[in-house]
Image: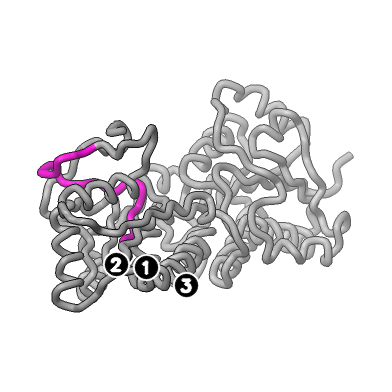
Amino acid sequence: MKTQKRLGILTSGGDCPGLNTVIRAVVSNATLTYDWQVLGIPYATKGLLETKAIPLSLHCLDLRGIDPLLSMGGTILGSINQGDTMTQVDDILAGYQALELDALIGIGGDGSLAILNELSKKGNWQFIGIPKTIDNDVALTERVVGFDTAVNTVVDALNRLTYTAASHDRVMIVEVMGRTAGHLALHSGIAGGADVILIPEIPYTIKDVCDHLRLLRNRWGRRFAIIVVAEGAKTAIDFSYASCGQPTCGIGQQIAEEIRSYSQQHIDIRVSVLGHIQRGGIPSALDRLIATAFGKAAVDLVADGQSGQMVAWQNNEVVAFPLETVLSQSPALVDPNNYLVQTARSLGIYIGNPTIQPVEESPYLSCC
């Protein structure tokens, strides 16, 4: 007969730094404060489907066993971000019951949290969500787990690329993640000294980009430049597309070819696609702080009998919102007139023009 509350925890969607830090905080608070059993569910809903769990309680691990999680990237529970979960609802619900869970904490982006919230309603689970994504686009929270470390990773890359760009008088184009939200490109571009920042929320033209590069060279004597572009940046409709000449190409390579074509002169351009490097690494101090606070708060919400809630960061403290309210909101995008955008412009950074009409469908998905 079960004598302790059994709390499950899983990570879902793409990985990011800070997930293990959340796990550590959940295990510590649940065990030390409430004397609960904590079970890690491997590979998100796949673990529930296969009725698998990893004991994480301190009586199984001791404090020294979970301390390394504070600074460990990725997730020890594994994660998946593919598959049609909702076609296997009955089997997932049965797995939850077979594991005799009393409550579940799920760490994910808005897509993962939406699926887990739907499952919790169908199975009448007690469920608390914790937001994470390097895009920082979950509604109603100023910060999510993983964003700050990703910004630091991009800034580190920009620092390194700036030296080689200056040494060879090159234009360096750095492509970062962000299909719909430009927070990562905006924050890292400002902190990393970019000359041009292109984000999905503010359209741009190659003419404006080239004019800005020319201004840097002719007026300010800058013989190199750094361009940070989010993968979902959109150009204006007055722009003529050219093929990048490759079987597959991202927006960074496409912009490089368009700059060469428009300028009609030799420009030494290099493209760096940071890719999954942005998801890796040791979580920053801020991400550790937020992850720990989120983990602690999620356990307290479970103890308080709350369900269907998501923890959020607002005004330097943790609050909670109903998941239905969070998921009914649009993703948190960059406001074209916000303070950081204004800051970028005041520093002489070209960041597009919000008054021009963007292309409805990105040409980079079909041009090559």
Q: Is residue 230 magenta?
A: yes
Q: Earlier in the sequence, mark 1 or mark 2?
A: 1
Marks 2 and 3: which is nearer the front?
A: 2
Viewport quadrant of the C terminus: top left
**Position in image of residue 116 (x %, y %):** 56, 38
Tell me if mark 2 has few (under 14), some (14-19) or many (20+) residues whose alpha carbon lies within 10 angstroms of its own: many
Question: Three-letter amino acid code at disc 3?
Answer: Asn
Residue 227 in view (yes/no): yes
Viewport quadrant of the N terminus: top right
Look at mark 1 in the image and give the residue it sits on.
Answer: 165
Q: Is residue 217 above or below residue 261?
A: below
C-alpha span from label 1 to label 3: 38 Å
Look at mark 3 in the image and give the residue it sits on.
Answer: 316
Of residues 69 and 139, the one nearer the viewer is 69
- In the rendered structure, find residue 70 and report the number of the disc placed on it: none
Residue found 52% across the figure and 35% down from its top: 115
Q: Is residue 321 above or below residue 14?
A: below
Kindly indicate whether the residue at mark 2 contacts the one at mark 1 (C-beta within 8 angstroms): yes
Kindly indicate whether the residue at mark 3 contacts the one at mark 2 (C-beta within 8 angstroms): no
Q: Is residue 258 above or below residue 172?
A: above
Q: Earlier in the sequence, mark 2 or mark 3?
A: 2
Marks 1 and 2: which is nearer the front?
A: 1
Element under disc 2 = strand
